[in-house]
Amino acid sequence: MSDNQAPIACHGATSHAVDDSPFVNGLWKHNPVFVQVLGMCPTLAITNSVRNAIAMGLATTFVLALSNGLVSMIRKIVPNQVRIASYIAIIATSVTIVGYLVDAISIPVSIALGPFIPLIVTNCITLERAEGYAAKHKVTKGVLDGLGTGLGFTFALTCLGTIREVLGSGTFLGFSLFGPHFEPWVLFVLPPGGFIALAIWLMIFTTWRSWRAKLKKATTKPGLVAIAEVHS
Amino acid sequence: MNESLTHIVLDSMFINNFVLAVFLGMCSFIGISGKFATAWRMGLSVMFCITVSGVLSYFMNILLVAVHAEFLRLICYIIIIAATVQLTEMFIKKKSPALFRELGVYLPLITTNCAVLYVPLMLTARNYNLVQTTVFSLAGSGGYCIAICLLSLVRERIDLSDVASLAKGTALTLVLAAILSMAFMGFAGMGN
């Protein structure tokens, strides 16, 4: 993974043209966390338990679907110069709605997520999807993409949350896994554990991708290998 | 709330360091910490943005409470932040075009740096007065500056060593950040 991947993706310049289905693309192929390395702050901060991770993921999904839908609705009216400002205003409005919604549904969850609910505004993923996808596509596609990306984000958060909760407190969704004699590896629920868990997942995905690339190279014709190498 | 200023400084700079304990501003922390020379300048730009927007949002909050429009907080804060970042960008472009090119896309991206929005949110939640606001903004962003400088210094050394290809790039940076974060956990005892 190259170092300058994050800024390009953050800036919304990478809108991959091949989209068979926006939902599946966001969910897996361009998974915001594992592939694009976006939205790091909530990924690291909120994943010390699976329950928080899922709540955070769903809140972000809702914001993404809402803001993507609204952005693609106004994409032909808004002048080019003020588009980013209006996207941010739309995202901030969606986040305000979600904030009140979470408060209404569950106060404990709202307290556990704390400032990270309003901080969805500054999550790169929302702006990246608005600028990179919703601004160029129809409303239905925009909403689908928002849902897919959001669920992809939820999936990634759950992956991290699982490692951290199982190792760090010996539970999964609050249920004890190893019985009373398990000595929890407390480091994993503390901040450093977030960094380590994400590093582990990134290494797993890098290995998997390089393994797949090798497999692909072996099956393609020799003439195409050079082209594949340039693009990888 | 009546917190002493020393407590605010220690708490926001070391104990609850913005980057290494609360996980704010990860994008730029990982993305722009490759070189020390760029890292400290980025740290200072973020410090400037956070302090100016923090103080401005303090006044904005008073205004919003006066007109009973608290639900507009988030939108108003983000607009203040965007304006401040724009101002900083213009200032740096005028004063140092070289630095402007070097910071590149990360300069406008300070707008979507969570640390900048975190400060006004915390001011509101903790009811800080103007002096506490200024101290909190300066100390918190100073903590960000310290963290990004430390990481960039370590990464400059790592560049020269032989690293397994599996861990190269973001994964290695994350592991380094984890070690720094463990070191900062040692400050936790100072709070009591």
Image: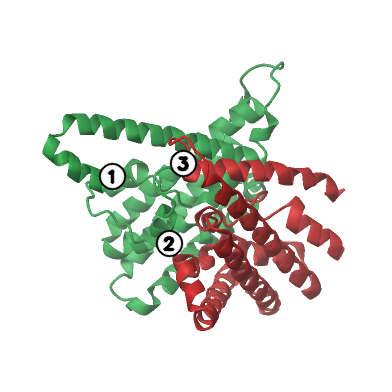
Chain colours: A green, B red
Mark 1 to mark 3 CA distance (whole Å): 16 Å
Residue count near mark 1 (Cα–Cα under 10 Å), binned few <14, some 14–19, many ≥20: few
Q: Which percent across, then down, holds residue A104?
A: 60, 52
Q: In this view, does B68 lie above or below B25?
A: below
Q: Tell me the SS state at disc 3.
A: loop
Mark toward the viewer: 1 or 3: 3
* SS at mark 2 in the image: helix
Same chain, labels 1 and 3: no
At x 37%, y 32%, the residue is: A208
Report the label total: 3
Q: What residue type is labelled 3?
A: Lys
Choose mark 3 or mark 2, whichever is in front: 3
Instruction: Give the image quarter of residue A193.
Output: top right
Q: Mark 3 lies on which chain?
A: B
Q: Label 2 neighbourhood size at 10 Å, few (<14), some (14-19), many (20+)?
A: many
Q: How far apart are marks 3 and 2 (CA)?
A: 28 Å
Residue A127's mark?
Answer: 2
| Residue identifier under label 1 | A232
Query: Which comes sooner in the sequence, label 1 or label 2?
Result: 2
Left of B141 or right of it: where is A73? left
Q: Is residue B137 left or right of residue A26?
A: right
Q: Quadrant of residue B39?
A: bottom right
Residue in view at x 53 percent, y 66 percent: B110
